[in-house]
Amino acid sequence: MSLDALENDVIRSADSHAENVEGDGTAAPATTPSVDEETEAQTDNLARQTGDWEVYVYYFKTWGVISTVIFTLSLAVVVFGAKFPVVWLSWWADEERDHPSEKSYFYMGVMVAFAASSLLGLFIAVGTLFVVIVPAVGNKIHRRILESAMQAPYFFSTLTDVGTTLNR
């Protein structure tokens, strides 16, 4: 569930709190949820179980431009280094057929360079992801949810189950 959904929960909680307080300040009798509310809750639970694209979009937006470019380019190097050797091997085979053993070391060296570049790209991609992106995104998301929770009105904290707030 996205942060916007949490903010909407705070607003709904405030509205329901205002509806449950009578004019003299005493709590109104509890009402049972309507069919529409139950259907909406089931839909929210289903969306939470299958994943919500807004969450993924929000997560990728928090990566930052530089980290995203480095990660994407290093993955492109990995894919190029893994796939292009097939084409290079066909060129090498054609060259060997026309001029046997003339440039074998050259073609072999280029194959090694493809493997090395693919391995280097993989190290850069994994390092960028786990050393730079994941910690930075975790800090940003946790800071934002903490700020939202700390700015929530007091009645939200008293009316909302702690587990519900903690699991968002």
Image (spheres, rainbow, N blue to C red):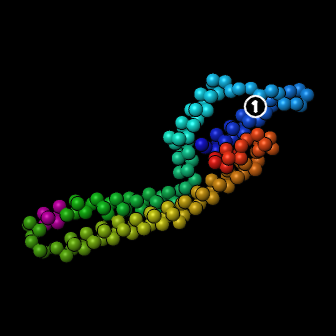
Most distant residue in the right direction:
24
In this rendering, the answer to whether 98 lies above or below 68 is below
Residue identified by numbered label 1: 16
Instruction: Say what secondary structure mark 1 lies in.
Output: helix
Q: How many numbered discs, if any?
A: 1
Q: What residue type is labelled 1?
A: Ser
Dominant SS type (magenta):
helix
| Residue 94 colored in magenta in the image | yes
Residue positioned 27% across, 60% down in the render? 84
Q: Quadrant of the N terminus?
A: top right
Residue 165 screen position, x and y as percent = 68, 46
Q: Position of residue 70 (x, y in %)?
A: 47, 61
Q: Which of 158 and 100 is in front in this view?
A: 158
Q: Residue at x 91, y 28 (%)?
A: 24
In this orientation, does residue 97 appear? yes
Relative to 71, residue 34 above or below: above
- Horizontally, residue 97 falls left or right of residue 54, namely left
Q: Where is residue 107 in the image (x, y as percent from the top left)?
A: 21, 71
Camera-side residue: 95 or 148?
A: 148
Q: Position of residue 54 (x, y in %)?
A: 55, 42
Q: Residues within 10 Å of mark 1 (few under 14, many from 20)?
A: few
Q: Which residue is drawn at 53% across and 41% down?
A: 49
Vertical order, 52 against 66 (above or below): above
Left or right, 88 with respect to 101, comes to right
From the viewer's side, name the closer residue of 142 and 65: 142
The residue shown at (77%, 35%) is 14
- Image quadrant where residue 89 sits: bottom left
Q: Give the range drawn in magenta.
A: 90-95
| Quadrant position of residue 72 | bottom left
**Is 121 situated left or right of 46 in this image?**
left
Q: Does the magenta stretch include residue 54?
A: no
Can I make out residue 53 in this image? Answer: no
